[in-house]
Amino acid sequence: MCPCWLARILAFFLSAAVAPPALVPLASSAQNTSTASPPQPDALLVVVRNGKYGYIDHQGRIVIEPQYVWGDDFDGGFAPVYLCGRAVSIDASGKVRPLRVVREGEVYAKSRGGKVGFADASGKFKGPPTFDEALPFSDGLAAVRAGEKWGFVDRTGALVIPLQFSEAYFFHEGVAIVTLDFDHVLINKAGNVIARGLQPLLPMLISEGRITIEEGNKIGFADLQGRVVISPAYDMAYAFSGGFAAVRQDGKWGYIDQRGRLIIPFKFDQAGYFASGLAPAKLGTESGFIDKSGNFAFHLDFDVTPGFRTFNAETDVSQFWTKDQLFGYVNTSGKVIWGPVPESPDHWPLLGWTVKQKERSCAGVSQTLKRAIASYPSFDD
């Protein structure tokens, strides 16, 4: 088991189970929001042109002209952008609104005075902040820590599983792996222990009824009752997606089904997650997306890609980067709808915004809109 601090970092990126590290660069979402919902089939896509962020549809047509110094993906009809020195939200028409950090009726983690509590959509605390740490929501619950013990709160901020675990991470499909009495145990949403003695590869790799486990440096899978259903036999494996899991043996990747049957032989040099019936893969000098028979549905010259995401083949698109660091979007028919171009979306600046960037974010903004943005509630600590 990896160190706890490393597991938490990995958990942030892997809890959505979007792609194996061999094929996708780590990407960050906006600020301190709760975990995003699964991508919507027709959500606008963020692009960058001449240093400005804008949005296109799934045919590659520009819908919102590139005009922001930063922007992120749409989630639930809104996207965060940086405008006039503030993070704000825009809708699909480009209308500017106060930053939506959480949906109405839900809460998000917010800190004050060194303690973490939960605030509503207006930024108002639901109660005094009393926790020392909180992880993003997943499957309706969020892990929280006070002192040395972890528990879980629901989306109203109420503590529903008492503080009792030495480690806790994310719920997926109604279960979570936690550490209790120096043992990795599987619990349900009532906090009841379902199984003990688990050896998870990482405590957040739960997908499609299967938990990725490790034993003797080999990887296998357990079910949601903690029973081993696919014996550890692989050098590496990724979580199930689209009914298949990518597994590696003797340096080559193949795919198994949920019963552990080898469906696609070990032949690929790299392999990713299935979504919309396709998965990114590399075989010698070939790269592209394979179908569930293991054949290339189309070739694409990429270096890294997260693969498709929405499981809707009619509208799904995937980001990709070439070896020259050019960025683009491709659809499930293999048509590149954007790029490849030199500029690609980036994460929120880890060290914050410079004065020059703040000034640039106000370029072309009307005085009326500037006053409106200045009046929006602040979600800073």
Image (cartoon, rainbow, N blue to C red):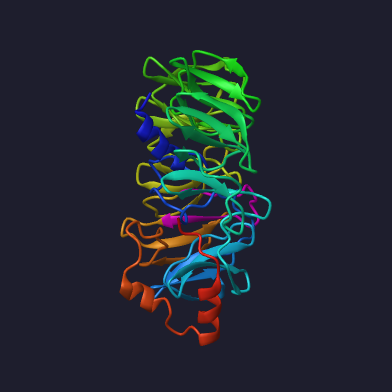
Q: How many numbered discs sit on the rendered protein?
A: 0
Residue 374 appears in the rendering: yes
State the image quarter where residue 248 is shown.
top left
Q: Nearer the viewer, residue 225 or 305?
A: 225
Q: Is the magenta region chiefly helix, strand or loop?
A: loop
Residue 171 appears in the rendering: no
Q: Which residue is the extreme one toward the right? A: 105
At 61% from the left edge and 56% from the top edge, which residue is drawn?
121
Tell me if residue 50 is in the magenta stretch: no
Tell me if residue 309 is in the magenta stretch: yes
Query: Up-down: is 359 above or below 339?
Result: below
Q: In the rendering, at what x and y percent does residue 133 appear?
A: 45, 39
At 36% from the left edge and 57% from the top edge, which residue is drawn?
322
Q: In the rendering, at what x and y percent does residue 64 appear?
A: 55, 74
Q: In the rendering, at what x and y percent does residue 369 appear?
A: 54, 81
Q: In the rendering, at what x and y percent does residue 77 appear?
A: 64, 62
Q: Nearer the viewer, residue 43 or 304?
A: 43
Q: Is residue 150 left or right of residue 250?
A: right
- Highlighted magenta segment, given as a residue range: 306-320
Q: Nearer the viewer, residue 277 or 22?
A: 22
Quadrant holding the N terminus: top left
At 38% from the left edge and 73% from the top edge, which residue is drawn?
358
Query: Up-down: is 17 above or below 356?
Result: above
Quadrant holding the C terminus: bottom left
